[in-house]
């Protein structure tokens, strides 16, 4: 049927018109009221929404409810950094290698003068010039219909972000995201290495590192064994429901398979210098020597008075413990002390000797280099980096030969009994015992048979 156009018959149009007129006549009053209501409610909503955008705060839930009551069509806003993204054109990116914030601003329509004032303004709040790092996220927010961005947001880490008001004199503010802390319990048993065991529990390597730190003076992690058991009570940090990191360790437990000894440490903050990990009796762990001068390593050769020397090809006592680690791995002072020797010999290579007290001295051999500022007479504290693993002197590969001296004689530090340090002062002990008992309960609540099931292959 050529030329035919779909049309509404005249009488039908009339009918619709008539009906509308009728409706208007009958409901004029109500329609007017509801129109006014819609205008008022929506203008309240829009103005509040705008002011919220400027403040960068969160949409109050009562506002959403108000809108719903007025039957105002509402879509949950798409939010980030406190902005309603739907009201902007959004440009998101990651800092490229060698990219500076200056270039980024120039590329987005800003002048050298703008860059200068941003550099000045940001110094006081968060130095964006110095802390602009490759791979970090940023965002430009441009109001719809406009060319020049109004806001710039930079996210140096998950915990915080920096907002620049590009329209108002480059005002800079730093916002911290609320972190939620939840206590977590970890338990496992070693089938191959500590790292594998921790991975098997689903926890992060950060947890393994924290556990090593907590137990570094009581457990030698360089020779963990199959069957060793561990438990840990610690904090996990969450931002917007996502796990972002590990917080404090409250308590740790370790039992070596070849010994009946159970190691417990408890975190306690008694104020002043009385902060850190303590054993069950309230004796500080930090007063003792670290079990090893390097982390995440293995013993490649034990203390052995009758060892066949691999380089010299003859029996020669090995009066130290060798820890194999990649060249450049930091070497730590195992205790507080004074550097009494720093030098080089054909056998030792680069080495350092530390005097801890009138009884004990420790020596570290074959270093690739010394830490900055370390010289004879330097005071070093426990855990301080004194040098780096290498293979200088008589060595077949990169390792640190760690030697322990007691009253001028070399001993096997792994067999030595060190007298425990003095406990917390009497007035702090009751408080400590309360904390200890709470966490002891939590550690004990972890069923060790469950741990074995979980880590079984
Ligand atoms: Zn050695």
Image (cartoon, grey):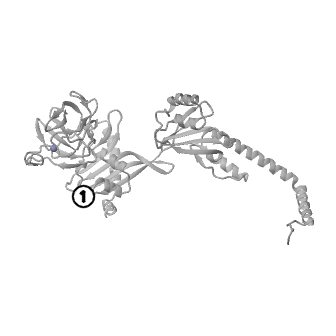
Residue 299 percent coordinates (x, y): 20, 49
Residue 72 located left or right of residue 439: right
Q: Viewer-proximal residue, 80 or 65?
A: 80
Q: If the picture is divided into quarters, which one holds ligand 1?
A: top left
Total marks shown come to 1
Determine the secondary structure under disc 1: loop
State which quarter of the image contains the C terminus. bottom left
Above or below, 399 against 117 in this view is below
* Label 1 beta carbon within 8 A of ligand 1: no
Q: In which quarter of the image is residue 196?
A: bottom left
Residue 405 located left or right of residue 281: left
Q: Would residue 129 be visible to someone looking at this image?
A: yes
Residue 375 percent coordinates (x, y): 23, 28
Q: Would residue 58 be visible to someone looking at this image?
A: no
Q: Viewer-proximal residue, 236 or 197?
A: 197
User: Residue at left 36%, top 46%?
Assistant: 249
Residue 310 percent coordinates (x, y): 12, 48
Q: In which quarter of the image is residue 226?
A: bottom left
Above or below, 44 against 27 in this view is above
State which quarter of the image contains the N terminus. bottom right
Residue 243 percent coordinates (x, y): 45, 50
Residue holding disc 1: 226
Residue 182 located left or right of residue 264: right
Extreme-bottom residue of the structure: 1
- Check disc 1: other Cα within 10 Å, few if <14, some if 14-19, many if 20+: some
Residue 254 located left or right of residue 248: left
């Amino acid at each position: 049927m050529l030329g035919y156009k779909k049309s509404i018959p005249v009488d039908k149009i009339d009918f619709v018109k008539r009906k509308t007129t009728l409706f208007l006549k009958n409901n004029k009053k109500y329609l007017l009221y509801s129109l006014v209501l819609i205008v008022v409610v929506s203008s309240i909503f829009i103005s509040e929404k705008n002011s919220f955008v400027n403040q960068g705060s969160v949409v109050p839930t009562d506002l959403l409810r108000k809108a719903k009551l007025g039957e105002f069509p509402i879509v949950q806003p798409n939010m980030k950094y406190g902005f309603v993204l739907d009201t902007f054109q959004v440009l998101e990116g990651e800092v490229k290698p060698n990219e500076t914030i200056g270039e980024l601003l120039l590329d987005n329509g800003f002048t050298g003068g703008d860059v200068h004032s941003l550099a000045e303004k940001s110094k006081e709040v968060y130095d964006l010039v110095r802390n602009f790092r490759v791979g970090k996220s940023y965002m430009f927010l441009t109001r719809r219909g406009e060319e020049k961005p109004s806001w710039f947001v930079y996210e140096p880490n998950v915990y915080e972000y920096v907002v620049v008001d590009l329209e108002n004199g480059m005002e800079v503010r730093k916002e911290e995201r609320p972190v939620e802390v939840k206590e977590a319990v970890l338990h496992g048993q070693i089938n191959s290495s500590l790292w594998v065991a921790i991975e098997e529990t689903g926890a992060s390597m950060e947890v393994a590192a924290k556990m090593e730190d907590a137990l570094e003076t009581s457990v030698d992690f360089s020779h963990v064994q199959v069957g060793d058991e561990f438990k840990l009570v610690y904090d996990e940090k969450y931002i917007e429901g996502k796990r972002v990191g590990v917080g404090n360790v409250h308590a740790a437990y370790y039992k070596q398979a070849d010994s009946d000894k159970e190691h417990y440490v408890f975190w306690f903050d008694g104020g002043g210098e009385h902060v850190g990990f303590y054993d069950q009796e309230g004796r500080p762990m930090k007063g003792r020597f670290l079990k090893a001068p390097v982390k995440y390593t293995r013993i490649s050769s034990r203390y052995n008075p009758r060892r066949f020397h691999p380089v010299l090809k003859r029996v020669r006592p090995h009066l130290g413990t060798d820890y194999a680690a990649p060249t450049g791995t930091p070497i730590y002072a195992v205790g507080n002390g004074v550097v009494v020797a720093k030098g080089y010999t054909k056998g030792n290579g680069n080495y350092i000797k530390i005097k801890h007290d009138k009884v004990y001295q420790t020596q570290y051999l074959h270093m690739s280099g010394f830490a900055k500022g370390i010289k004879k007479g330097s005071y070093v504290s426990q855990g301080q980096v004194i040098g780096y693993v290498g293979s200088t002197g008589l060595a077949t590969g990169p390792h640190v030969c760690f030697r322990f001296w007691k009253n001028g004689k070399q001993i096997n530090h792994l067999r030595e009994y060190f007298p425990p340090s003095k406990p917390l002062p009497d007035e702090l002990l009751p408080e400590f015992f309360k904390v200890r008992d709470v966490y002891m309960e939590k550690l004990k609540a972890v069923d060790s048979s469950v741990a074995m099931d979980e880590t079984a292959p």
